[in-house]
Image (cartoon, rainbow, N blue to C red):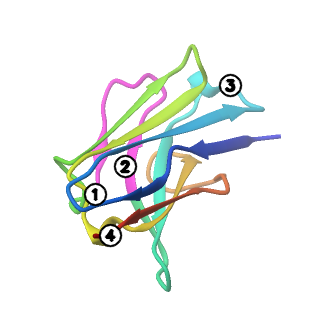
Amino acid sequence: EVQLVESGGGSVQPGGSLRLSCAASGFTFGNIDMSWVRQAPGKGPEWVSGIPSDGGSTYYADSVKGRFTISRDNAKNTLYLQMNSLKPEDTAVYHCATGLRVPYSWGQGTQVTVSS
């Protein structure tokens, strides 16, 4: 059974930073492309970033490019999202997901709130 457990969310002021983590289990993490997806209140899911199984490249939505960095540690079965220069419009529940651009399985998510 695929299990994805996100952590690291919280409340920050605009311009602040957070680092999200996603602990994966139930599958061979190092063989699977991964991504982050977010959902803001009252809106549909938005793909944020993706990374292939070998971590050799990274992909970002235009809205976060230059501010967010996705990475993975296959030895620790963990996916990360470093978020810098946060804006109020980044407020959402962030989910990690299997799949590079289209999410297949995703976790419960972690809340990120950016507000002054």
Q: Residue furthest bottom?
A: 42
Quarter-wise, where is residue 57 in the image?
A: top left
Is 14 situated left or right of 77 in this image? left
Q: Give the residue drawn at x 51%, y 36%.
A: 33
Q: Which residue corresponds to mark 1?
A: 61
Secondary element at image label 3 = loop
x%, y% of residue 18?
37, 45
Badge 4 amino acid: Ser
Mark 4 → mark 2, Cα distance in angstroms: 22 Å
C-alpha separation, residue under disc 4 versus residue under disc 3: 37 Å
Q: Amino acid at mark 2?
A: Ser
Disc on the earlier residue, 2 or 1: 2
Residue 115's label in the rendered image is: 4
| Nearest to viewer (mark 3 / mark 2) | 2
Q: Which mark is residue 28?
A: 3
| Residue 116 point in image, percent of width and height | 28, 70
Q: Amino acid under label 1? A: Ala
Q: Which residue is mark 2?
A: 49
Q: Is residue 24 above or below residue 114?
A: above
